[in-house]
Amino acid sequence: MNFQLTQEQEMLVDSVRSFVEKELLPYETEVDRADEVSPQLAAQIRGKAIAAGFYAFNMPEEVGGGGLDYLSQALIERELSKVSWALHVFVARPSKILMACTGEQINDYLLPCIQGEKIDCFALTEPGAGSDANAIKTRAVREGDDFVLNGSKHFISHAGHADFAIVFAVTDTYEHNGRKRNAVTSFLVDRNTPGMTIRRGPKCVSNRGYHTFEMFFDDCRVPANKVLGEVGKGWDVANAWLTAGRVMVAANCVGQAQRALDVSLQWAADRKQFGQAIGNFQGVSFKLADMATQIRAAELLTLHTAWKMDQGTMTDGEAGMAKLFASEVLGRAADEAVQIFGGMGLMDESPVERIWRNARIERVWEGTSEIQRHIISRELLRPLLR
């Protein structure tokens, strides 16, 4: 296996890294303290991302996206994540499941998202259905040419900026291995649809300025032509995207961890105690060595998994391994960075406390570490327990 990046990939990494340093990082502190990205700044980032050719890099070229392979996408995610989600989210990656759009949906939803004219959000999680997504209770009942939705969602990222939501609701039930299962359908629901209410959710300490929202459906009537994919086949359009998303989260974690290491190295070289740089002391230098080793391992695992996606050979367990390991490496790296900085590591004058806060959510969203371990162990045992 060749681990050497192509010249094009090296150039891509350099371009994205420069974009982050010039267009995103200068605003990080003010956005974190204000817990808000102004509409003007959001539009500015979006416009510059479009001009730079980074917008919708995850979407196929035939529909106007970047057409990049998964390995290249992971490299971009690694660089973008060196700044908070509150900012780099505006270098948009539309939900890949929009590729299930057909007919008028293509011009109404898919293409506008790729062109930067519309923004989507992914509405699956509910108060009683987090890790157990099959337990969602939002229902959609067919009435003539419409479906009527009732229920609620929470922890819906970026819904405050979205023009429409990809909403998952139960449309039927069926028996599987003696257990009742939900047949789920995905719907394209416009922001101004009567019966849908969106409001800001609880304040999160991670990624300030990147908000989650609650959504409520009260006899919300959605035309049948807004079904994304097939009725009862919502998981078919969601699962592949969710699994691939875990690899990209792993790449995000690698980038954040690398930034934690970079600022720690500089601090260890500049900070003087007992007449010399603290990096000369083993108590600090060994931390740096461990951080660098674990980050390199997480990076190689993540990029290898992205490469396997490109080959069509990646399994759910392998995606879970990348997400699990990279997110936990990030947690350790962020904690060690605080320790190296000492008291200053908890002050908002340095990026370390922000990295530390932001790191914590990575072991929770897109599937908790416990869920990843469940996926991995189930895949390992499946051939032996038949």
Image (tube, rainbow, N blue to C red):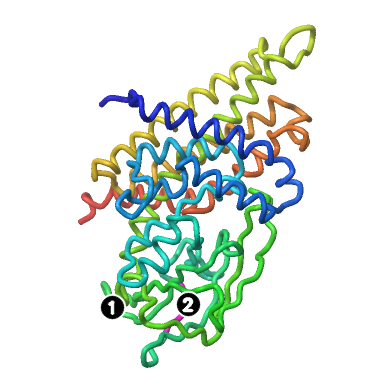
Q: Position of residue 311 (x, y in %)?
A: 24, 41
Q: 285 and 139: which one is in front?
A: 139
Farthest residue toward the top?
Answer: 275
The amino acid at mark 1 is: Glu
Q: What residue span does the magenta drawing correspond to?
A: 135-140
Q: Answer with left or right where residue 316 lies relative to residue 137.
A: left
- The C terminus lies in which quarter of the figure? bottom left
Q: In the rendered image, which residue does mark 2 sit on?
A: 137
Q: 252 and 129: which one is in front?
A: 252
Marker disc for residue 78: none
First in sequence, mark 1 or 2: give its number.
2
Question: Quick check: 324 above or below 175?
Answer: above
Q: Which secondary structure, mark 2?
A: loop
- Which quarter of the figure has residue 19? top right
Q: Position of residue 266 (x, y in %)?
A: 66, 19
Question: Quick check: 201 above or below 343?
Answer: below
- The N terminus lies in which quarter of the figure? top left
Question: Quick check: 25 above or below 172?
Answer: above
Q: Answer with left or right where residue 268 lies relative to residue 228.
A: right
Report if residue 219 lies within the magenta region. no
Q: CA distance from mark 1 to mark 2?
A: 17 Å
Q: Residue at x 56, y 45 (%)?
A: 88
Q: Which secondary structure, mark 1?
A: strand
Report if residue 137 lies within the magenta region. yes
Q: In the rendered image, which residue does mark 1 sit on?
A: 175
Comparing marks 1 and 2, which lies closer to the viewer?
2
The amino acid at mark 2 is: Lys
Q: Residue at x 78, y 13 (%)?
A: 273
Q: Residues within 10 Å of mark 2 (few under 14, many from 20)?
A: some
Q: Residue at x 76, y 50 (%)?
A: 34
Q: Position of residue 97 (x, y in %)?
A: 37, 60
